[in-house]
Amino acid sequence: MFVRNGANALQEWLETQGVQNMQSINKSLKAATRGPNNIPQMNKPVALSSAPATAFYCVSLNPAIDTRLILKGFLPGRVNRVEEVYRTPGGKAAHVAMALKGLGATPTWIGFSGGATGSELIAGLRRLGIETLPISTGQPTRVNLEIVDTREK
């Protein structure tokens, strides 16, 4: 309607809405203008309130078990003796949930898990105090393998 009839039609409609002139609209728009004076300060502490805490949901479409093998002197094509093995929950959402937990938040991890590795993933997250909402799958959860050579070169 306003495009075809132009500014006059807009002005007439505004008058039917109780707006006498455009100056009142311009004043209200200027008051809401964004700029450095209207940006809330992020570095000032927020007053504590009884409002509920922020909820963090970490959604994982492709979780994993991260397996880290520690050995001294990796030799390709030879038998290598592993000194230590660490298996931890993996995938971006699990890592984010673990970081949030370390910062004092209470994240909830939501994701697919299956097989023995899926059970290990869920148990590992729960052991860290992270609430989980697993979605069972018919396939086992994947495993990432990292080989760390601690031999000094």
Image (cartoon, rainbow, N blue to C red):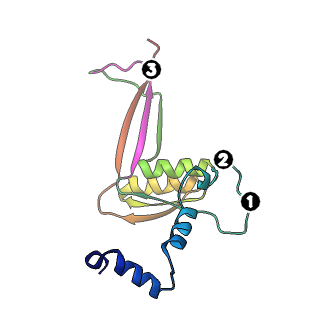
Residue at position x 36%, y 37% in the image: 145
Question: Quarter of the image holding residue 31?
Answer: bottom right
Q: Earlier in the sequence, mark 1 or mark 3?
A: 1
The alpha-carbon separation of the residues under discs 1 and 2 comes to: 12 Å
Residue at position x 54%, y 73% in the image: 24
Amino acid type of disc 2?
Answer: Asn
Along the line of sight, the residue nearer the viewer: 34 or 144:
34
Residue 135 visible (yes or no):
yes
Task: Report helix, strand or loop for mark 2.
Answer: loop
Residue 141 at x, y = what percent? 35, 53
Mark 2, residue position: 43
**Which quarter of the image is occupied by the C terminus?**
top left
Amino acid type of disc 3?
Answer: Lys
Residue 38 at x, y = what percent? 60, 56
Q: In the shown orientation, is residue 74 left or right of residue 107?
A: left
Front label number (2 vs 3) = 2
Mark 1, residue position: 47
Discs 2, 3 touching: Cβ within 8 Å: no
Q: Is residue 71 magenta?
A: yes
- Span of residues in magenta: 63-76
The alpha-carbon separation of the residues under discs 2 and 3 comes to: 46 Å
Discs 1, 2 touching: Cβ within 8 Å: no
Residue 72, labelled with which disc?
A: 3
Along the line of sight, the residue nearer the viewer: 110 or 87:
110
Q: Residues within 10 Å of mark 3 (few under 14, many from 20)?
A: some
Amino acid type of disc 1?
Answer: Ala
Residue at position x 53%, y 59% in the image: 33
Task: Report helix, strand or loop for mark 1.
Answer: loop
